[in-house]
Image (cartoon, helix red, strand yellow):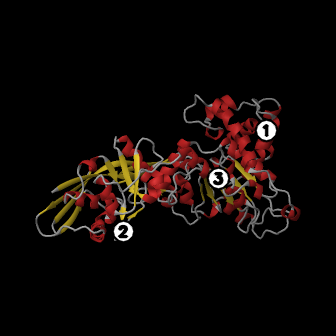
C-alpha cells in the first residue's frame, strides 16, 4: 500500500515542495526514513507512532518505508511529522487519496496527536501558491503567518483527527482569512520614541542625518551618556516598511524561528543587538546546515553593536562583505545558501578603556598608548564603511531634570521621508542605489560637487584637522544628505561644516 503526500521544506529563505511517499508492506515491523533526513526527521518515527495511537488510530505492525523526495537535498526539522503521519493513514486507506495531492501539509506532532508550530511557514505558503496547489494545512499557531500569502487557502489545524476529518471532506477546519492592510497597520507600532530622550540634540541630529541618507553611524561617549537609548530609537525615525519589505523580513524571521507565535507580519524595522561575545557564524550566519545570522535578521532594519571594540577582530571583519553587498552567501559542502542583509549599522563605544576620556567631570585613568590600542581594535576598512562618528557627551543635571519632552519620532520621520523621496528621484535610474550612503565614486562626482566657499572649507578641514583621505568621500555623502534634509539642490558651506563635525575619529592620525 502506497500513499503520497505533498509537504514543503526551507532552503535558505525560500521553500521547495517535498513529496512524502509512504509504503506499507508485509514483513517484520520496522520504520525507516530515506531521502537525506537529519536526526530530527529520523526521530519522527517515534513521535508519529505515539501520535497515531493516542489519536485513536491503529498503527500498522508492518514494514514502513518513508521517502522524502527530492532525495539529494538534506531534510531537517520536525515539520515532516504531520505529512508522514497522514501518509501512513493514507496508505491504510483511512484518508481520501484525491485530496492529498491538492494540499501541502506541514507540522510537528506532539505525542497526544496535537500539532505544534514550526519554522518557515510563510515561504512554504509562497511555494505552495507557486506550485498551483489549492491550499496548505499548517499548525493553527502558524495560520495567520501563512494567510499573508494571497491566492492560496490556508487551514490551521490543532490535532491529527481534525486533519483526517478535513481530508475526508467532513469539515474539521476553516480557511484562515486576515485583513492584510489592517494587520500591517496594527503591527506597525514601536514601543519606544524619541520623546523619551532628554538633551543630546547634537546626537539626535546626527541620527536624523544617518536615517535620511542610510548612513552607518558610530556613537562615542562615556558610560551613561545615552548611546544605547539613542540607538534603540533609530528604527522609529526610518521610513515605514513597505508591505513588500515586511514580507521579505517576515520570511527571514520565520525561517530563523524568531517570529512571535500567531504573528502575521513583522511590520516594524528590525533592531538586532547581539552581545559582543557572538561568534562570526552567529553574526554572519553559518552552521553545518547554513542558517541566517544577525546581519540577515536585521534586514531592512538596524544592526546595533554596543561596545564595538570588545567584539573579536575577526568577527567585525566578516561584516565588510554584507555592508558592501547587502547580501551574505554561505558556502558549505552540501551547497551554498544566500541571505539578504541590507541593514544600517549603528555602533557604540567608549572613547577609551575606562570610558571617561571625554567626560569633563571624571578623570580618565588611561595612558595615550592604551587609548591608541583601544581605538585600533576597529580596523580601518571597517571604519571606512561608517560614514558618521558622533561624540555623545554626558548629560548635565538640568537636562536630566527638565520636564520638557523631546521631539517625537513621527516628526523626525516625516523629515527623513521627505529627504528619502528626493534621493529616490535622484537615483531612479541608478541600479542598486536607493539612498546617498550607497553612492559609488561616479555618483559622488555627479551629485556631490562643491565649489567656492564650500570647497575651501573642506580643504581647510582636511589640512588643519588632520582628516584622513578616506574621510573625503564620506563628508561629501553626508553633506549631500544634509542638503536633502534642507531641500536644497546645491551643497552649501554650512552643509559641509556640519558633515565635518561627524568625523570625530578621523581628526587624529590612527595606526
Judge from the rendering whether residue 429 lies leftward or rightward of residue 375; answer left or right: left
- Sort mark 2 into few (<14), some (14-19) or many (20+) by Cα contacts within 10 Å: some
**Residue behind mark 3:** 189
Quarter of the picture holding the N terminus: bottom left
Mark 3: which secondary structure? loop
Question: Can you give x and y, in whole percent of width and height, for residue 245 in the image?
Answer: 54, 44
Instruction: Specify which label sits upstream in the sequence, 1 or 2.
Output: 2
Mark 2: which secondary structure? loop
Q: Nearer the viewer, residue 367 or 93?
A: 93
**Residue behind mark 1:** 495
**Residue behind mark 2:** 110
* Residue drawn at 64 percent across, 41 percent down: 437
- From the viewer's perspective, is the residue at label 1 or at label 3 nearer? 3
Q: Nearer the viewer, residue 496 or 431?
A: 431
Residue 294 to residue 502: above or below: below
**Farthest front residue in view:** 170
Task: Measure the C-alpha gap from mark 1 to mark 3.
Answer: 33 Å
Task: Measure the C-alpha gap from mark 2 to mark 3.
Answer: 35 Å
Q: Which corner quadrant of the image does residue 36 belong to?
A: bottom left
Question: Can you give x and y, in whole percent of width and height, for residue 153 in the image?
Answer: 40, 46
Question: Can you give x and y, in whole percent of width and height, for residue 426 in the image?
Answer: 65, 30
* Residue drawn at 36 percent across, 47 percent down: 135
Amino acid at each position: 500500500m502506497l500513499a503520497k503526500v505533498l509537504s514543503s521544506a526551507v532552503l535558505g529563505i525560500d521553500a521547495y515542495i517535498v513529496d512524502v511517499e509512504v509504503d506499507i508492506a508485509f514483513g517484520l515491523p520496522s520504520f525507516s526514513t530515506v531521502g537525506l533526513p537529519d536526526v530530527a526527521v529520523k526521530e519522527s518515527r517515534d513521535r508519529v507512532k505515539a501520535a497515531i495511537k493516542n489519536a485513536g488510530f491503529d498503527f500498522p505492525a508492518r514494514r514502513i518505508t518513508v521517502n522524502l523526495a527530492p532525495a539529494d537535498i538534506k531534510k531537517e526539522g520536525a515539520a515532516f511529522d504531520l505529512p508522514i503521519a497522514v501518509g501512513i493513514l493514507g496508505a491504510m486507506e483511512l484518508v481520501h487519496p484525491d485530496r492529498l495531492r491538492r494540499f501541502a501539509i506541514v507540522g510537528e506532532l506532539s505525542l497526544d496527536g496535537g500539532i505544534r508550530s514550526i519554522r518557515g511557514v510563510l515561504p512554504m505558503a509562497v511555494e505552495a501558491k507557486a506550485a498551483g496547489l489549492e491550499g496548505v494545512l499548517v499548525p493553527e499557531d502558524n495560520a495567520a503567518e501563512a494567510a499573508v500569502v494571497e491566492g492560496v487557502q490556508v487551514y490551521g489545524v490543532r490535532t491529527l483527527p481534525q486533519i483526517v476529518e478535513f481530508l475526508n471532506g467532513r469539515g474539521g477546519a476553516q480557511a484562515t482569512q486576515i485583513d492584510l492592510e489592517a494587520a500591517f497597520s496594527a503591527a506597525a507600532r514601536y514601543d519606544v520614541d524619541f520623546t523619551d530622550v532628554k538633551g543630546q540634540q547634537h546626537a539626535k541630529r546626527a541620527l536624523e542625518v544617518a536615517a535620511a541618507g542610510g548612513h552607518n553611524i558610530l556613537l562615542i561617549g562615556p558610560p551613561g551618556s545615552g548611546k544605547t537609548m539613542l540607538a534603540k530609537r533609530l528604527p522609529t525615525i526610518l521610513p515605514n516598511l513597505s508591505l513588500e519589505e515586511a514580507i521579505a523580513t517576515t520570511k527571514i524571521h520565520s525561517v530563523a524561528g524568531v517570529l512571535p507565535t500567531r504573528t502575521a507580519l513583522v511590520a516594524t524595522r528590525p533592531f538586532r543587538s547581539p552581545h559582543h561575545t557572538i561568534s562570526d557564524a552567529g553574526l554572519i550566519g553559518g552552521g553545518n546546515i547554513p542558517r541566517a545570522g544577525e546581519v540577515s535578521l536585521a534586514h531592512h532594519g538596524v544592526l546595533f553593536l554596543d561596545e564595538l571594540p570588545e567584539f573579536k577582530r575577526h568577527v567585525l571583519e566578516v561584516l565588510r562583505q554584507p555592508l558592501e553587498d547587502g547580501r551574505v552567501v554561505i558556502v558549505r559542502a552540501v551547497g551554498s545558501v544566500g541571505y539578504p542583509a541590507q541593514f544600517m549599522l549603528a555602533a557604540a563605544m567608549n572613547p577609551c578603556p575606562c570610558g571617561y576620556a571625554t567626560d569633563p567631570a571624571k578623570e580618565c585613568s588611561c595612558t595615550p598608548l592604551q587609548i591608541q590600542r583601544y581605538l585600533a581594535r576597529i580596523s580601518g576598512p571597517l571604519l571606512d564603511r561608517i560614514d558618521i562618528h558622533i561624540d555623545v557627551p554626558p548629560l548635565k543635571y538640568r537636562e536630566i531634570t527638565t520636564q520638557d519632552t523631546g521631539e517625537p519620532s513621527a516628526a523626525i520621520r516625516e523629515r527623513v521621508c521627505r529627504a528619502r523621496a528626493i534621493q529616490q528621484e535622484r537615483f531612479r535610474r541608478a541600479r542598486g542605489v536607493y539612498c546617498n550612503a550607497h553612492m559609488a565614486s561616479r555618483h559622488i562626482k555627479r551629485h556631490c560637487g562643491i565649489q567656492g566657499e564650500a570647497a575651501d572649507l573642506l580643504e581647510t578641514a582636511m589640512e588643519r584637522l588632520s582628516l584622513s583621505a578616506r574621510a573625503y568621500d564620506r563628508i561629501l555623502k553626508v553633506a549631500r544628505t544634509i542638503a536633502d534634509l534642507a531641500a536644497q539642490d546645491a551643497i552649501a558651506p554650512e552643509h559641509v561644516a556640519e558633515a565635518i563635525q561627524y568625523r570625530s575619529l578621523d581628526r587624529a592620525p590612527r595606526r
